[in-house]
Each structure stands twice: as structure tokens, then as C-alpha cells.
Image (cartoon, rainbow, N blue to C red):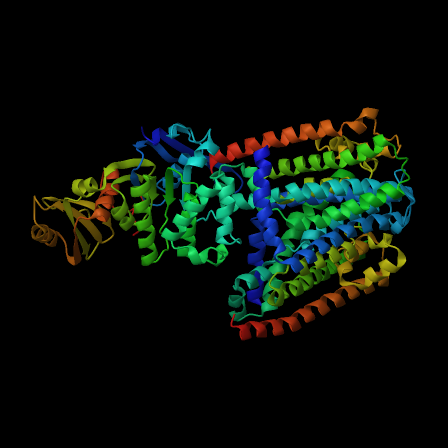
């Protein structure tokens, strides 16, 4: 684990230095990332220009929810998002050379394509989250502050696990990129609005299978002092760390299986 | 003419071989359609009559808009021109005894027809099976819808062609692509139907070409605009399409001149 | 104590082929089977075979990229498929067609990154790098982004990269491919001296027989997944090079000619190749016999050399002379 971080830092660092050499282009890109993501929130504002509340959630509350989700997703995208390119490596045959080095191929794939520009997305998420913290009418307590901060981390972890899990599909089925996007970006989209607006089976899916609901919804329900936990008990709002741990375990296992499959069948 | 038909046919055939990618795409569009529909339905429940659509109308809107994304090439599907400019292969294209723009238009038509039939139709089918969709407003609406679809494809091509031509000057088209993608996402009605926009923004959106990609055809289909209003809307759509194509031709001549000067 | 050892090593792939419009059929393709060999430390072994013979598959199994279907492989006593990372520390690999270097970074940055990934100590690294840079003449190229290097320069960069951590074992897969004559000579010289001074064990896969002649005392010849020959280079020529070959182009395709003292080894349309031993008959006699049996348009006589010896070996791999239809024939690409 420590060695993984070490290698990530080494190779990722080289990427960052190389990116920063083209200072102007880098800044431009980061800003454009920020703007594009911000337009997504503009859509939320437009929706709320028509209604006062959605599923009982006010704009302030949705802002908080959206910000938490996007902030977590931005972080996941920054550190783990480049895994969607592993299918390019496999297709081009360059995955092999990662196996020649005494380091985890997963870390190498991620570090090789680490892009600091994605900070633009993170910044947008963080900004909306900060605004949401202010406008959602939250009665802050120490517990709620702690939960909010923790949820960003657990949320990022859950999204990261989803990224890895969906990326593993390309070891068996190469042209699956859009299906993967449906789950990763789709996951971030569903997290923008309260889960109550989705049909019953989707709610169950989001709670128990692709646990996006634990990224922001359940913690937010507690922080906002709401009670619509979709039939789940109170402690669901605190279950995110456990869910995150399970997700990571699942992702790690599937990745190992995927690489073993690759090494058995060749490219 | 025969040549371009050939190009279109070849393109259609090529795209039809990407089976796994197409299935993958149908899945994605269906999922996104579902998510968008849920949001709009929640709006409809909270304020019935908003945006001039019923619940079913909103669901149909979401499914249709997702079905049309790959058809009009919203996310730069088939952006081969800029790649060819980057590698220099575009020179062979320019040496061909065929019109550069028409050639690529023909190829895009082939691609578009495949995406419409091979991807769009299944997405609509899935949507119909899962929730039941709103039927088109009338036979006339259907006919006008078909016409609007043609204009949509031309508009999509016109936009992408211009973006691709920027490669002759910028080499890296990622910036222009991101910009167009964003404006498209926003003003085509894909994110949120224009009818839900606040008045000023909606006005702006209807004046821009992006509405022609998704909003106009679906409006015609659902009957949000009818009669001569609808015809006028589609005519406006065509006007933009032609303007973009003409603009493309103009830029193309200066682009090709640039290639000749730089020696390819 | 062999540094690389394989026992009945084999790899079978399951390939999905289209059978009609919608169905798939699964075929089993044997890439490599029954490979058994041992390489001692300090040896320089050439590994040759036609395209698709199984060379890359073997190397992949030796490095742990591919897990064998059956048999065993040990590198310094370790199983590469289980202990990939430990084995990776002891092996340097150069793939001729794919670079290990970071494409858009300067060469020296790639070296630095590799140093850290392989955990090479600074002082050791400095001296190793200095040595490699000098021997491979990379001094002026260090600050150049890898994508701007010529093929020959990049290849030398890759070789240096593979040796930065001073591995006792080196695999080179087509290291001289696409290089000009001067670069090839440089690379060969470097490899030879490395082997002589450091005792690095080298396994060299190549199509270039000059590489083999200049560098390897031992060759392993593989075709269709099986080891056809494993022994000294001199043996190859001696054992198989006794024969001369008469290549005739006839006026019209004919059945394999029967000529006393010679045997037909290949028929391809109008062309037939007859092998004969100098000790048993003479070229003149063979030509005369052929001329009386068919009309000759053109003829050449090939003398024994490595290439023909190896081609003969491939031919020996299959039992009867074939008539050029169906069964694919193998050729060495020079």
C-alpha cells in the first residue's frame, strides 16, 4: 500500500511537472473544466426556477446534496478517473510493459495519466458544497460537521471503487466504455438530486448494489435534519465508512481477478 | 452523386460493425434517459403543466433526446477530421477529386442513419417497454418530425465540421470541442428542456442553432408546437443548418489554402 | 545452477472465431508446447523462429506477463507468474517495437523515474547511468523528449533503461529492428561487452541472423510452438549445412522430380528445391538429371549458410515435401 502511494507520487509527479510546463494551457483547461461542471449546476438552478421544492427538498438542500456529491466525485475523478484509459492500454498492447516493472499495474495506469487539470471539477464541487453548507439552513453541530467532512472522503472512496469496478469490465469486453460511463458519470448524476425522485427499484439499486446513495444522500439526510431515509434505519446515515470499505474490497478483488484473467489469456 | 452515395453506404457499414460499442451505448443512453426522466417527472409532479408537458410527455422527451444524441453526434462521434489534420492524413482527402465537405457529409449521413436505426430506435424501444411513451401528436407531426430530423443531422454535421476545421489553425481541437459540447449540452435541451428555462434564457436558446439538434424535433413530435408554428420552427432549423454548412464551406477554402501554403 | 529453467512449458490460447453471423466458436490455439531448456548464468542465447512461432509468448511467460497453461518456468529459482515483482527486479527487458520510456518526457526523466520505481540507490545509479550513457552515446540526447528521438536513438535509450537497475538477466526482443547499419553495430558491440564484462545473461530474440552470428554461441530455434533445435551455433551449420540446394524454375509445374542423390524439399508452382550432399553427387549431375526430366527455365545453387541451414530445419519440421498447396510454408525474413 505504501509502495503504491510512493510509485503514484513519483510517476504522477512527473506528469504534473510536465503539465505545468505549459502553464497557460493548463490554466485555461482547468478553468474550462470548472465552467463546464458549473453549467451542470446551472441546470439545477433552472429546474428550481420552475418549482419550489423537489420531492420535498428545497433548492438550498439540493445545493448541499449536489455539492457533496460532486465534490466527492471530483476527488475520485482526480485520483482514480484515469483508470478508464486502461482499455486504451490493453487495446494498444502497452499494458504489458506495466507488468514488466516491479510495481502494481493499477497504480501505474493511474499515475501515468494523472491530470491536475481535473482540479477544475473538484473546485466546482467544493465551491457548490461550501455554498450549500451555507444556504441549506443546517443546524450545525460538531457531529454534523464531522459527518460532512468524513462523507466527502467516504464518498470519494465509493466513487473510486465504482470507477475501478466498471473499468475492469474492459478486460473481458473491450468496447464497453459507454456502459462504464453510464455507471460512473451516471452515478454522479443520480447523486445530484434526492434519491426519492427515482423509482423504487432504482432506489434499491443505489442503496444496495451501486451504493451511490451512501455517497451523499444518507449522510445529508441526517445533516439536514430530514427523515426520508427511504425506509432504512437511522444508522444508514453513518454507514458510509463501512460501505466504502466493502466497496474498496470488492474493487480490489475484481481488479486482481481481471489482471489474472489478462495474464492467462494474453492480449 | 453516385460517389457520395457510396461513401455514405460504406460509412453506414463501418459503423454497423461496432456492435459491442453500440449495445454499450444503448445501455448508457437508456440509463441517462431514465435519470433525466425521473428529474423531469419530479418537476411535473411538483408543478403540473410546467414546460407544457405531461408526465408522459417529459418521459418521452427524455427518451427521445437520449436517442437523438448519437444520431446528431452531440459528443463528437466520428471526429475524424481533426485527427487527420493532426497526423497530416487530411492531405490525401484534399487531393481527392471530390468535394471535401460533401465527402464528409456523406460519411456522416451514413453514420447518422446507422445511429438512428441501430441505436436510437432500440433506445426508444427500451423506453417504450419500460415506461410507455407518448404517441406523436398527429400524422402531420410525424411527417414534420422526419423533416426536422434531417435538419438536425445537417445542423450537427455543420457544427462538428466547423469545430474540426479549427484543427487547421489550432491543432488541438479539444478546447473548441469542449466549448461546443458544453453549449450543445446546455442549449439543445438535452440537460433540461428549453421550455423549462427562465424566459430570457429560453429566448436565447431558441435563437441558437443547438436547439435544432434535439429540442426542435422533439417539440414537433410531442406536439408542443403545432401547425404553422411548427413549420416555422423547422424552417428556422433548416436556416441554421444551411448557414452552418455555408460557413463551413467558407472556412474550408481558407483552410485548404493554408494547407497548400504550409506544404501539407 | 541455471538462471532460467523451463520444463515442458506450454501455452494454449482459447480464441473465439466467428462461425456464421451470430455464433462464435471457441478454438484452441497452441502457441507453445513442450518447451524445456536451461540457461546458465552468463550465457548469450539467440532465440529464433518465424513470425508466430511462439517467441514472444515464451518471453511473456518468462517475465510473468503471461501465465503458462502447463509446465514450469523458474527464473533465478522464482516462478514469474507468482512472484512477478521479485522477478521484475532481476530482469531487464527491451521490446524492439514498444518502448519502456515515457513518450513525452525527456530521456533523463524516464531514467530518473525508473531509478525510483526500481529503488536503485543514488550513488550506484549515478555510476551505472554514467557508464551506460557513455557506452551508448546518449550524452546529447538526455534532455530530448523521447518522442523526438529517432528509432536508433530511442532503442539505445530503451537498452539503457533496461539496464539501469543492473539486472543479471536481460531479454531483448528484436532490439535491432529498423536500425541502420551503424546503430546495429553499436548495439551489438554494447551487448557483447556487457556480457563479457558483467556476465549478464542475455536472451536475444531476433530475425536478424547477423545479430545471432555476431553475438550468440548458442541458439534455440522454435517453430509452431516447439523447440526444433537447441545447441551451439556452429552445430546448426555443421549438422544441417552439409547440403547444397539446387533451385530450379521449370517451364511448367510438375510433380516432385525424382533425381538420384537428391531429394525435393519444396515445390511451389514451377519452382522446386532439391537438396543434395556434395559427398554423394555433384551439382552437374543433379542439373543434368533434372534437365532430362523437365524443361528448366532458370536455376541457382545455394550454398550452406545459417539461413539455409535454418530454413532446412523448418523444412525438416514437417515430414513430406509438400506441393505448395494448403500447408503454409515458413521463411526466415532476413
Q: Who's the residue at 72% across and 27% down the image?
A: A242
Residue A257 position in % (x across, y down) = 55, 31
Looking at the picture, tell me which residue is in the foreground, A73 or C15: A73
Q: Is residue C143 visible?
A: yes
Question: Taking B163 as reference, is C281 left or right?
Answer: left
Looking at the picture, tell me which residue is in the foreground, B169 or C294: B169
Residue C74 position in % (x across, y down) = 38, 29
Which residue lies most toward the front here? C123
Q: Is residue B126 visible?
A: no
Q: Is C59 above or below relative to B146? A: above
Residue C124 position in % (x across, y down) = 44, 42
Question: Taking C139 as reference, is A218 left or right?
Answer: right
> How many circles with numbers are drawn on the protein?
0
Looking at the picture, tell me which residue is in the foreground, B192 or A165: A165
Q: Quadrant of residue C5?
A: top left
Q: Who's the residue at 41% across and 38% down the image?
A: C91
Question: Taking A137 as reference, is B209 left or right?
Answer: left
Q: Who's the residue at 65% across and 31% down the image?
A: A248
Residue B179 position in % (x across, y down) = 71, 59
Looking at the figure, which quarter contains the N terminus of chain C?
top left
Q: Quadrant of residue A76?
A: top right
Q: Who's the residue at 7% across and 51% down the image?
A: C285
Amino acid at each position: 500500500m505504501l509502495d503504491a502511494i510512493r510509485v503514484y507520487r513519483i510517476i504522477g509527479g512527473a506528469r504534473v511537472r510536465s503539465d505545468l510546463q505549459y502553464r497557460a494551457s493548463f490554466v485555461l483547461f482547468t478553468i474550462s473544466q470548472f465552467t463546464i461542471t458549473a453549467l451542470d449546476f446551472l441546470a439545477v438552478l433552472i429546474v428550481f426556477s420552475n418549482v419550489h421544492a423537489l420531492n420535498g427538498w428545497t433548492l438550498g438542500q439540493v445545493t448541499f446534496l449536489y455539492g457533496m456529491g460532486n465534490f466527492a466525485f471530483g476527488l475520485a475523478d482526480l485520483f482514480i478517473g484515469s483508470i478508464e484509459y486502461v482499455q486504451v492500454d490493453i487495446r494498444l498492447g502497452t499494458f504489458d510493459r506495466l507488468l514488466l516493472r516491479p510495481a502494481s499495474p493499477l497504480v501505474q495506469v493511474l499515475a501515468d495519466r494523472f491530470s491536475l487539470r481535473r482540479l477544475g471539477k473538484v473546485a466546482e464541487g467544493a465551491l457548490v458544497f461550501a455554498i450549500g453548507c451555507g444556504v441549506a439552513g443546517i443546524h450545525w453541530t460538531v457531529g454534523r460537521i464531522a459527518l460532512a467532512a468524513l462523507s466527502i472522503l467516504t464518498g470519494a472512496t465509493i466513487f473510486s471503487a465504482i470507477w475501478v469496478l466498471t473499468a475492469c469490465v474492459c478486460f473481458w469486453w473491450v468496447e464497453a466504455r459507454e456502459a462504464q460511463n453510464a455507471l460512473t458519470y451516471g452515478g454522479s448524476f443520480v447523486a445530484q438530486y434526492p434519491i426519492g425522485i427515482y423509482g423504487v427499484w432504482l432506489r434499491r439499486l443505489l442503496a444496495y448494489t451501486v451504493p451511490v446513495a451512501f455517497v451523499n444522500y444518507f449522510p445529508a439526510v441526517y445533516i439536514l435534519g430530514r427523515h426520508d431515509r427511504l425506509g432504512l434505519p437511522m444508522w444508514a446515515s453513518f454507514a458510509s465508512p463501512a460501505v466504502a470499505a466493502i466497496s474498496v474490497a470488492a474493487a480490489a478483488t475484481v481488479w486482481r481477478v481481471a489482471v489474472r484473467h489478462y495474464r492467462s489469456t494474453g492480449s | 452523386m453516385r460517389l457520395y452515395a457510396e461513401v455514405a453506404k460504406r460509412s453506414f457499414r463501418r459503423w454497423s460493425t461496432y456492435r459491442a460499442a453500440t449495445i454499450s451505448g444503448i445501455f448508457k443512453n437508456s440509463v441517462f434517459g431514465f435519470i433525466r426522466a425521473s428529474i423531469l417527472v419530479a418537476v411535473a409532479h411538483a408543478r403540473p403543466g410546467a414546460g407544457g408537458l405531461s408526465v408522459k410527455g417529459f418521459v418521452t422527451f427524455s427518451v427521445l433526446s437520449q436517442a437523438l444524441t448519437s444520431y446528431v453526434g452531440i459528443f463528437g462521434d466520428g471526429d475524424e477530421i481533426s485527427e487527420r489534420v493532426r497526423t497530416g492524413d487530411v492531405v490525401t482527402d484534399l487531393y481527392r477529386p471530390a468535394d471535401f465537405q460533401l465527402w464528409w457529409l456523406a460519411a456522416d449521413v451514413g453514420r447518422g442513419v446507422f445511429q438512428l436505426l441501430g441505436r436510437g430506435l432500440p433506445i426508444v424501444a427500451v423506453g417504450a417497454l419500460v415506461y410507455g411513451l407518448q404517441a406523436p401528436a398527429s400524422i402531420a407531426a410525424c411527417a414534420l418530425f422526419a423533416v426536422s430530423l434531417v435538419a438536425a443531422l445537417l445542423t450537427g454535421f455543420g457544427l462538428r465540421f466547423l469545430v474540426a476545421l479549427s484543427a487547421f489553425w489550432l491543432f488541438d481541437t479539444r478546447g473548441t470541442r469542449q466549448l461546443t459540447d458544453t453549449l450543445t449540452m446546455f442549449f439543445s435541451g438535452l440537460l433540461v428542456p428549453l421550455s423549462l428555462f427562465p424566459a430570457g434564457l429560453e429566448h436565447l436558446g431558441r435563437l441558437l442553432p443547438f436547439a435544432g439538434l434535439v429540442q426542435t424535433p422533439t417539440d414537433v413530435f410531442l406536439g408542443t408546437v403545432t401547425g404553422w408554428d411548427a413549420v416555422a420552427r423547422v424552417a428556422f432549423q433548416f436556416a441554421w443548418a444551411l448557414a452552418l454548412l455555408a460557413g463551413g464551406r467558407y472556412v474550408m477554402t481558407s483552410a485548404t489554402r493554408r494547407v497548400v501554403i504550409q506544404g501539407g | 545452477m541455471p538462471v532460467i529453467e523451463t520444463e515442458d512449458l506450454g501455452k494454449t490460447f482459447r480464441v473465439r472465431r466467428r462461425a456464421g453471423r451470430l455464433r462464435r466458436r471457441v478454438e484452441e490455439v497452441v502457441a507453445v508446447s513442450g518447451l524445456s531448456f536451461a540457461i546458465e548464468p552468463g550465457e548469450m542465447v539467440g532465440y529464433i523462429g518465424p513470425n508466430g512461432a511462439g517467441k514472444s509468448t515464451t518471453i511473456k511467460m518468462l517475465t510473468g506477463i503471461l501465465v503458462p497453461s502447463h509446465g514450469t518456468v523458474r527464473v533465478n529459482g522464482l516462478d514469474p507468474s507468482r512472484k512477478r515483482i521479485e522477478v521484475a527486479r532481476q530482469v531487464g527487458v527491451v521490446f524492439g517495437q514498444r518502448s519502456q520510456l515515457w513518450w513525452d518526457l525527456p530521456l533523463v526523466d524516464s531514467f530518473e523515474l525508473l531509478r525510483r520505481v526500481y529503488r536503485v540507490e543514488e550513488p550506484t545509479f549515478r555510476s551505472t547511468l554514467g557508464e551506460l550513457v557513455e557506452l551508448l552515446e546518449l550524452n546529447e540526447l538526455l534532455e530530448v523528449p523521447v518522442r523526438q528521438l529517432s528509432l536508433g536513438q530511442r532503442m539505445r535509450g530503451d537498452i539503457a533503461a533496461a539496464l539501469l537497475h543492473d539486472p543479471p538477466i536481460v531479454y531483448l526482443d528484436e532490439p535491432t529492428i529498423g536500425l541502420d547499419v551503424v546503430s546495429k553495430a553499436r548495439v551489438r558491440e554494447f551487448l557483447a561487452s556487457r556480457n563479457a564484462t558483467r556476465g549478464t545473461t542475455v536472451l536475444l530474440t531476433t530475425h536478424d541472423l547477423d545479430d545471432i552470428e555476431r553475438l550468440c554461441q548458442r541458439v534455440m530455434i522454435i517453430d509452431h510452438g516447439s523447440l526444433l533445435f537447441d545447441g551451439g551455433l556452429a552445430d546448426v551449420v555443421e549438422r544441417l549445412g552439409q547440403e547444397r540446394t539446387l533451385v530450379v524454375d521449370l517451364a511448367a509445374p510438375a510433380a516432385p522430380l525424382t533425381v538420384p542423390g537428391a531429394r525435393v524439399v519444396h515445390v511451389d508452382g514451377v519452382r522446386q528445391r532439391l537438396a543434395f550432399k556434395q559427398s554423394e553427387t555433384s551439382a552437374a549431375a543433379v542439373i543434368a538429371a533434372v534437365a532430362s526430366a523437365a524443361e528448366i527455365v532458370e536455376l541457382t545453387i545455394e550454398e550452406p549458410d545459417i539461413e539455409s541451414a535454418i530454413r532446412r530445419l523448418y523444412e525438416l519440421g514437417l515430414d513430406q515435401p509438400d506441393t505448395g498447396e494448403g500447408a503454409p510454408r515458413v521463411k526466415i525474413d532476413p
